Every structure is written in structure tokens, then in C-alpha cells.
Image (cartoon, grey):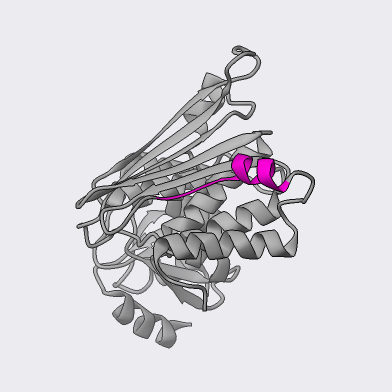
Amino acid sequence: MKELSLNILDITENSVKAGATLTEILLDETETTVCIVIRDNGCGMTEDILRSVTDPFYTTRTTRKVGMGLPLFKMEAEQTGGYVTVESKAASEFPEEHGTTVTALFYKSHLDYTPLGDLTATVTTLIQGHPDVDFLFEHRRTDGPTVSLDTRELRAVLEDVPLDSFDVICWIEGALREQYGNRSP
Amino acid sequence: MTVAGLLQHEAFSPVCLPDGEREICGVYIGDLLSWVMGRASAGNAWITIMSNINIVAVASLADTACILLAEGVTLSEEIVATANAKGINILASTLSAYELAVCLSRLL
């Protein structure tokens, strides 16, 4: 994909589909690398399924035979000299503590590194599309302070106001853009 | 023209042809797989320099007539086996994507 933020959106959608009530999107940048962790408490996967998730001919969708989210993400990471790993605990085997963690490492100096893109738009889109589940977003940067947003904190303050109401979404977008140091146009 | 028909031209060599009688209808060139997935049309000959297993999946999703590997790109045996199993035609060439496109514009 043209931006890693689109891959993040795609993979986080898998977490929501897996019934996650909390999905953490954690980015940790150094001068040379960016580590992306997407961790959820969804239903997880058995080892059999886990082995096939980076196979492009595997998918959770029923409409087609191939699923490209993780295979493309893995390919993009490997093109920079990095990697993608997927760990998972299936709810059927671990009823207390289940979920999936996708970890990716990208080398930013590689010519084939895909830029991160508009993370504010990604996070805002996720919250707008799934106002009833929680997201923790945290981006540790080298060129500025850490950007973070936790919908659980927002929910505590907002009480009964839904997260996808127009004013809340605008506020979320503005708050993220402000933390990134660029105001929304 | 069919995919197998392209082999009459010296520029192309076969990698795998599980469905050689597939008719070619138009050409698409691109290496950003997510982009190709949404833009290549069914029946296109798709020119790329990518050699990851994902090209087989993209060709399958977009229902292209064949993959044309440009600039002497080669594939692992495992990828060729998957392409055969999934019915994906692949031809190779030492020509660049541009040269292949010029060649195809004369042939098709």
C-alpha cells in the first residue's frame, strides 16, 4: 500500500472483526527503524490458522479465496530488511487471556520503505467506524513528543455521548493533529 | 491473442502455463501490489518486476490473463508450483516493462 497507515487500518479491522474490545496500536520510532505493534484481545487464532495468515491465499472473508492484508504488510516490512511476526492465543484454548499481536519492524533508511502516512486519519476512521470498542493509540517519535489517544479515557469523560458523534470525532482528529504539530486544514 | 500465442515471439519464455489458451485483453503495468489489485482488469497481461508469492494472489484476485515478469526477474520453485496450482499463467522476459509494452502494442 502507498502508506503504512493504510496497512495499520486494514490489520486493526481484523482485530475488530475478531471481537476485540480493546485494540492497541503502538508505534515506536528510532532514528533508523519504526516498530509497529497491533495487539488485541479478540478471539485469537489456533496454531493451524496462525501458520497460514501470511499466506496470501488464506482469508477470513468468505467472498474470495485470498486475503492480502498481512501478506502485503509482511512483504513491505521485508522489503526494507525488517520482518512481521504474528502471535496469537485462541479463546478456545485460553479463555482467560486470548488475542492476537502483530509486530512489524521497518528500516526507514531503505529506499523501499513505505512512508507512515496519515495516522490521524487512520485512528479517526477506526473510532468513527467502531465507536463501541476501545482503541489505545501511541506513537513514540524521534522528531517530537509522543502522540497518544485512549478511547477508554474519552469514554470516562464523555459518559453517554457516543464516540462517533460529529463533535467528538472532530475533537479527536483535532487533538491528534495538534499533538503531531500540524493543525487540520 | 492467447497467452500461449505470445511464446511465438522470441521476447517471451514460459515460466508456467496452466491456462495457456486464456485470451489476452489489454495490458497493465505496476509493482505496487495493492494498487494493481484494484486497477488491473480481468484478462490483462500484467507486467511487473515483483517476485514475491503475493503476485500470484494479486493475479488471481484481479483475474489477469497472465503475469509478465520483466527485466529477467525469476521466481522460486515454490512460487511457480503455487501459480500452477492456482491456474496462474506466468511468462518471463529480459525486456524492460516499457519495451514489453511496446512489443505487446504491436502483437495485440
The quadrant holding residue A90 is top right
Q: Nearer the viewer, residue A60 or A160?
A: A160
Q: Nearer the viewer, residue B13 or B71?
A: B71
Please, which residue is most extreme toward the right here?
Answer: A160
Q: Nearer the viewer, residue A3 or B53?
A: A3
Residue at 70% over, 64% down: A167
The quadrant holding residue B90 is bottom left
Residue at 51% over, 38% down: A24
Residue B32 counted in the magenta span: no
- Residue B59's place in the image compared with A38, above or below, is below
Callout count: 0
Q: Taken as a whole, is the magenta stretch helix, strand or loop?
A: helix
Residue B64 seen in the figure: no
Q: Which residues are magenta?
A: A147-158
Residue B29 seen in the figure: yes
Residue A32: x and y, percent?
A: 20, 51
Residue at 42% over, 71% down: A182
- Residue A78's place in the image compared with A118, above or below, is above
Residue A160: x and y, percent?
A: 79, 46
- Residue A91's place in the image compared with A66, above or below, is above
- Residue A56's place in the image compared with A21, above or below, is below
Q: Is residue B41 left or right of residue A168?
A: left
Residue at 27% over, 54% down: B74
Residue A156: x and y, percent?
A: 67, 40
Q: Quadrant of the N terminus of chain A?
A: bottom left
Residue A152 counted in the magenta span: yes
